[in-house]
Image (tube, helix red, strand yellow):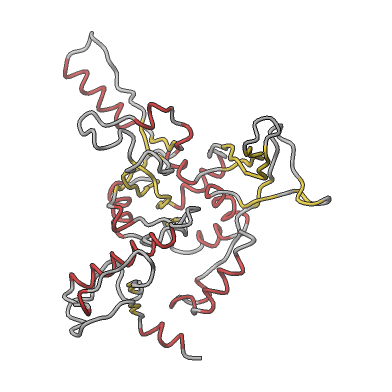
Amino acid sequence: STETRGVVEAYLRGNRFFGFSEESVVFFVAQDLPVMDSRGRYLLKKKSEIWRLPSDGGGVFDALRDSGVLNDLKSRPVEYLYMCESNNLLCRIADPLLVGLTIHTHTEVALKCVERLRVEEQLPLLVTIDQSPHRADLSPAELAELRRRAESDMRPLVLRPGQLSERMRYERDKADPTKLQLRVGSIAELLVQLAFVDSVLERRALPWRRKEVPIETTISPITGLPQRRCAFQLEQHVEDIAAIARSAVALCVDREGYYAQVNSDRASPLLACAAMSTLHQSWLVGAGARFVGDARVDLQGKLLCEISPLVSYEGEGLLRRYPEELSLPLFIRSRFEFEALVP
């Protein structure tokens, strides 16, 4: 966004773009969209300025085009775009599993998903609509063939928890009541064919949704209880691209290795750091490393363990590298990062 660009750019420059050449790193800003009241009237930030907030992830395609980045990508030998949100500490950039699945299945869009464990989780849900035919005049073989075709034509939909009825949110899997029926949650990590992006922009196909923007909380003069007044903003979600693609596929992964989100919950940064540290410590222990006093990562953020992705992407290359006992907290940097610390 406009507000965060300076911080992000300064951080990457201060770390020498983590080994990339400066020419390979391009910054662009997503469009800010106006905030409206319940009647669709624009609200003012001040007397001569419309109140605007950053658009959601779906605005990335317009931003790529408007900034010239899309044309720049087309001039390079680039076939796919890998997109992810920055608030998942366990996001694996250019995950070879997702890349391999996309290429192997020849799909336009691939999404990464995890299992939704609790009703309260706000993960967007990936679902398909059952369009299988149910006809009594067909033989079993004919019915099976029609159902096979219907399954191949099914389009995935991404639903927000607010779009679900109470029954749908709480419904349990009949085969396994310990699991939710609608439980495939998107973590906003996608691989998209670059050629498909033009089609999305030309068709203006991503749907717009209304998002609440809290603006103030007052005390009701009638009930004496707090009441929140909301404005609204239109937004698009990047996962909705799957519903308009000719083909899409989802890769479901374990949360422990792929998902640790930082959100508005005050405790989430510590929990996400602990999840990342637990994973990284498990890589070291699996590679034969020992820790002083058999120490383990804690949830208070004092005993953390981090391995730079420039050292190991998912635990590879660590075997027998640390014969001596290690102490927590621990941060294992690459040689490049040590050199970057030297003025």
Q: Quadrant of residue 228?
A: top right
Residue 324 vs 47, above or below: the answer is: below
Residue at the (46%, 42%) spot, across then down: 241
Residue 73 vs 307, above or below: the answer is: above
Q: Quadrant of residue 149?
A: top left
Residue 27 vs 175, above or below: the answer is: below
Residue most toward the top?
A: 137
- Residue 110 percent coordinates (x, y): 37, 48
**Could you tell whether 1 is left or right of 323 in the image?**
right
**Could you tell whether 108 is left or right of 51 in the image?**
left
Q: Name the foreground residue: 211 vs 145.
A: 211
Residue at the (33%, 50%) spot, across then down: 102
- Residue 2 percent coordinates (x, y): 64, 60
- Residue 254 percent coordinates (x, y): 27, 52
**Could you tell whether 222 is left or right of 314 in the image?**
right
Q: Name the foreground residue: 259 vs 291.
A: 291
Residue at the (42%, 28%) spot, across then down: 166
**Could you tell whether 172 is left or right of 300 in the image?**
left
Q: Name the foreground residue: 12 vs 185.
A: 185
Residue most toward the front?
A: 224
Residue at the (46%, 47%) spot, across then down: 196
Residue 160 vs 279, above or below: the answer is: above
- Residue 164 percent coordinates (x, y): 44, 30
Quadrant for the N terminus in the image:
bottom right
